[in-house]
Image (cartoon, rainbow, N blue to C red):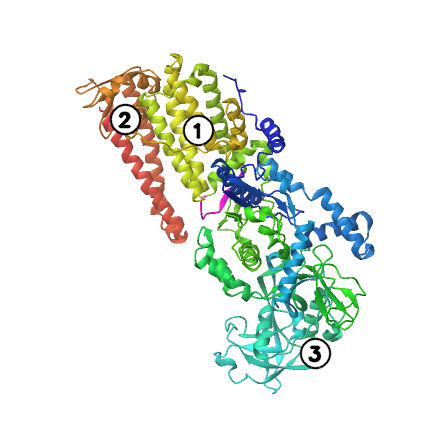
């Protein structure tokens, strides 16, 4: 048998197998043309990304199932790729150009700037794909896609034109999220809410009838320059007589009306709120309901425009100071309060988002949403865990039109051209400037300068990556896909949109199962973030513990429906388990004679038991993987390897292997081969190395998934009795701190045959010198007794041991009594019980119950030892 290294060198194994898998094309789809296809599309990470722990978890839960399906004989396509990430990538390159050359993109011009971005992408954009490789992921790297590849770009144009021709794409003026630094509309997914300590200004708006003021509260006093109303709740008696009247808008010379609106919270501030339809989403809706004018006071760069009057040209922050100062000078600031609120920031520029009414391109979503809603309600599409289906449905059933235009240069430029009169035409193919408009006949004079939202390409990902809009062989074979694993944050931003696109362009749901993986938190339960500095870099963990350890740890912690609290030390669990398997395999390969390879597994009670337990493990792991219960799968493998195989069978086999029992050796090799197969989806590097050492004909990644096999209830029941007896003897030895072999043990049983037959097993695994069994065993003197369901274990104790144990327990009792007295004194102190928080007092009372129970147990134990 080949001899394995003394320790599992994860780095060496990874460096060997990662390029080997790719060189041999083991994960290339199409290797099994007659097999049933199984497809999974990786959620494409941004080209600006580096692997973080959320990526690692998401990639592993995809790879585990891809490897599992491959072992089941399926033709697996797990397609990798990256997203061009319009805003993020443009921001990175703009920052780089400015840092290196002190130039802006406008200095370079559009074409030159786009060339710069492509050059950056070629140099840095595939970094995260290499890191995913190092995690051991079995993607079909030959099909790696990028959302701006030629064919994927054509798919974007075709989809745009199709929607245009159906009237589902239009250009209109709507409220959008505006990034004043990037000078672009941004999507909801590109915003982060940051809790911010600020102020709440209470401002006085003079009533036009001369009867005092209406006080409104706002966190953004500069936007009052764009107010067109004050709103109150229709049921608020304080303002019932004011509705329909007008108030003066300070600093502007305008008057605005008071309206009644159900959305106003009477408990916020004074119960009256300013309405700024041009700069607040909720106010925009109020404005539409009441027919209010929209006043835009902002330029695209965040400075105030001419509509702001005397404040035109000021930056937002400076305008706020000036507005507050002028209001104070006029006695119109009622009061200013400290106030903590969520400030929406652009994810890329980190600048405050401005709600802004802007002319943009939109997709009509309501018609597209209907089949996507039906897919879940009719059972075509399922979510795991199923509670996430509600998030999906809630968004789709209240969907708003999608703003798909971005004022950027990097991305898919909108395929629309205009004549001099502004008449638009959409085209899949480029149209030449000067060529006639197909309807007006007038020369085309320009192309729309905006690019499409990144999601407008990634919503096509499940089929554009397979060649759509061409009817390719890949599209015919691998669409629809079977499995999508992603994060909860993009259920509606990406998942729902992909479902809509799948039905709209191919008439099919793009996948049948969506697995929403857990969020990885730090050990305190906080989200990992750069600002908190609490992130854990998976690359560091791979370097320290190995990729297999990282993968397995993530799996065993990924309990369905619960987020993962993670500390670096938790990866020790995975590393220890990899070492356990390695050491067990090393022992087997060193100890089992070569002739055992051609022998049949044995019929010994131990062999039948481990093969039955193996069947249970295979069934448990298989069922858990089928149901996407990753933690259950990992735990079933862990328990079988660590408990059944290593702690019991391996130890029991040693005497038989020394006796050159070939049947035992064959059983060891057979079970080890099954362990390699079960471990392969979760620990592929270890499995590859051990599979080769076992002489498997196929690489571990292509081995067949093991069959569960029959259960042997009799063997399992018999072994349970033997194990219970061994554990009972071990408990006595631990309780009384006996040296191994220091004394004998007796088993009183009405069925001594099994214990007599397994005397060697008991002697090898129990710490007693000898183990006797019989119906009428009655050792004299003091004893320790362990009562089992069918048997009783008795261990004689010598007088010195009893005396020493009595003294030890007496000392423990005295310490326990001191603890109990201390707690009683604290609880008797009225100053403590009256001033401490109730939960603190309750905790002390719980401690008191536990301490009293310990004192009682120790007293009983001392009494059992006799005088």
Residue closest to the eye, 307 or 802:
307
- Mainly helix, strand or loop, the magenta region? loop
Disc on the earlier residue, 2 or 1: 1
Image coordinates of residue 383 in percent, x first then y, are 46, 52
Q: Is residue 805 magenta-colored?
A: no
Q: Position of residue 487 (x, y in %)?
A: 54, 50
Q: Which residue is mark 3?
A: 252
Q: Is residue 867 above or below residue 135?
A: above
- How crowded pointer 3 is (Cα within 10 Å; few <14, some 14-19, many 20+) is rated as some
Q: Which mark is residue 718?
A: 2
Q: For mark 1, what is the residue? A: 674
SS at badge 2: helix
Q: Secondary structure at mark 3?
A: loop
Nearer mark to the viewer, of 2 and 1: 1
Residues at discs 3 and 1 in contact (Cβ within 8 Å):
no
Relative to the observer, which residue lies in front, 676 or 550?
676
Earlier-in-chain disc, 3 versus 2: 3
Classify 743 as above or below 453: above
Magenta residues, as a range? 559-567
Relative placement, left or right, of 389 versus 661 is: right
């Amino acid at each position: 048998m080949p001899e394995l290294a003394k320790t599992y060198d994860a780095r060496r194994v990874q460096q060997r197998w990662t390029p080997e898998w790719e060189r041999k094309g083991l994960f290339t789809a199409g290797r099994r043309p007659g097999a049933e296809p199984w497809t999974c599309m990786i959620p494409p990470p941004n080209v600006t990304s580096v692997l973080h722990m959320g990526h690692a978890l998401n990639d592993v839960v995809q790879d585990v199932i891809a490897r599992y399906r491959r072992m089941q004989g399926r033709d697996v396509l797990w397609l990798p790729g990256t997203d061009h990430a319009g805003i993020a990538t443009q921001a990175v390159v703009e920052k780089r150009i400015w840092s290196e050359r002190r130039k802006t993109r406008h200095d370079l011009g559009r074409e030159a700037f786009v060339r710069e971005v492509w050059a950056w992408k070629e140099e840095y954009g595939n970094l995260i794909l290499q890191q995913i490789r190092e995690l051991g992921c079995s993607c079909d790297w030959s099909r790696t896609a990028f959302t701006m590849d030629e064919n994927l770009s054509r798919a974007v144009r075709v989809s745009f034109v199709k929607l245009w021709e159906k009237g589902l794409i239009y250009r209109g003026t709507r409220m959008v999220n505006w990034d004043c630094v990037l000078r672009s509309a941004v999507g909801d997914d590109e915003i982060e809410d940051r809790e911010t300590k600020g102020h709440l200004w209470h401002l006085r708006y003079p009533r036009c009838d001369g009867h005092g003021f209406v006080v409104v509260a706002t966190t953004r006093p500069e936007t009052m320059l764009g107010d067109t109303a004050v709103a109150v709740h229709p049921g608020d008696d304080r303002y019932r007589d004011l509705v329909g009247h007008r108030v003066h808008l300070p600093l502007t010379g305008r008057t605005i009306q008071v309206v009644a609106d159900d959305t106003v919270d009477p408990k916020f501030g004074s119960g009256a709120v300013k309405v700024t339809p041009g700069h607040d989403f909720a106010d925009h809706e109020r404005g539409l309901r009441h027919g209010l004018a929209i006043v835009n006071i902002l330029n695209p760069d965040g400075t105030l425009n001419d509509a702001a009057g005397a404040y035109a040209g000021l930056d937002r922050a400076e305008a706020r100071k000036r507005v507050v100062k002028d209001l104070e000078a006029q006695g119109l600031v009622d009061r200013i309060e400290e106030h903590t609120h969520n400030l929406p920031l652009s994810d890329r520029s980190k600048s405050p988002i401005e709600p802004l009414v802007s002319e943009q391109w939109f997709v009509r979503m309501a018609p597209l949403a209907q089949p996507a809603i039906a897919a879940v309600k009719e059972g075509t599409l399922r979510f795991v865990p199923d509670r996430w289906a509600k998030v999906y449905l809630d968004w789709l059933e209240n969907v708003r039109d999608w703003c798909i235009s971005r004022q950027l240069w990097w991305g898919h430029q909108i395929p629309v051209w205009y004549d001099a009169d502004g008449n638009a035409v959409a085209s899949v193919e480029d149209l030449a400037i000067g060529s006639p408009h197909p309807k007006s006949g007038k020369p085309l004079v320009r192309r729309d300068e905006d690019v499409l939202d990144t999601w407008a390409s990634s919503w096509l990902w499940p089929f554009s990556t397979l060649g759509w809009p061409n009817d390719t062989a890949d599209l015919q074979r691998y669409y629809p896909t079977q499995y999508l694993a992603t994060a909860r944050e993009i259920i509606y931003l990406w998942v729902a949109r992909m479902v809509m696109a799948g039905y709209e362009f191919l008439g099919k749901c793009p996948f049948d199962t969506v697995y929403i993986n857990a969020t990885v938190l730090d050990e305190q339960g906080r989200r990992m973030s750069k600002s908190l500095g609490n992130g854990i870099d998976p690359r560091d963990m791979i370097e320290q513990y190995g990729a297999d350890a990282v993968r397995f740890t993530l799996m065993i912690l990924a309990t369905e429906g619960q987020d993962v609290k993670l500390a670096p030390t938790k990866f020790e669990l995975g590393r220890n388990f990899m070492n356990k398997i390695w050491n067990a395999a090393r022992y087997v390969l060193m100890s089992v004679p070569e002739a055992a390879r051609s022998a049949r597994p044995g019929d010994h009670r131990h062999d039948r038991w481990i093969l039955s337990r193996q069947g249970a493990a295979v069934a448990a792991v298989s069922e858990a993987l089928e149901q996407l219960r990753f933690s259950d799968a990992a735990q079933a493998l862990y328990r079988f390897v660590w408990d059944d195989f290593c702690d019991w069978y391996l130890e029991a086999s040693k005497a038989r292997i020394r006796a050159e029992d070939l049947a035992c050796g064959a059983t060891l090799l057979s079970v080890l081969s099954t362990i390699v197969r079960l471990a392969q989806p979760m620990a592929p590097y270890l499995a590859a190395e051990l599979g080769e050492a076992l002489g498997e004909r196929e690489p571990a990644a292509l081995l067949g998934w093991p069959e569960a096999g029959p259960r042997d209830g009799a063997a399992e029941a018999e072994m349970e009795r033997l194990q219970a007896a061994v554990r009972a003897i071990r408990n006595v030895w631990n309780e009384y701190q006996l040296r191994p072999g220091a004394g004998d043990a007796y088993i009183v049983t009405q069925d001594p045959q099994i214990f007599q037959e397994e005397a060697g097993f008991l002697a090898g695994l129990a710490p007693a010198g000898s183990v006797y069994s019989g119906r009428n065993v009655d050792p004299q003197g003091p004893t320790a007794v362990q009562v089992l369901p069918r048997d009783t274990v008795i261990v004689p104790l010598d007088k010195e041991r009893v005396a020493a144990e009595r003294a030890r327990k007496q000392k423990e009792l005295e310490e326990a009594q001191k603890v109990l007295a201390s707690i009683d004194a604290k609880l008797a102190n009225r100053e403590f019980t009256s001033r401490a928080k109730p939960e603190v007092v309750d905790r002390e009372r719980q401690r008191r119950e536990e301490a009293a129970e310990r004192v009682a147990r120790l007293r009983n134990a001392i009494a059992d030892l006799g005088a």
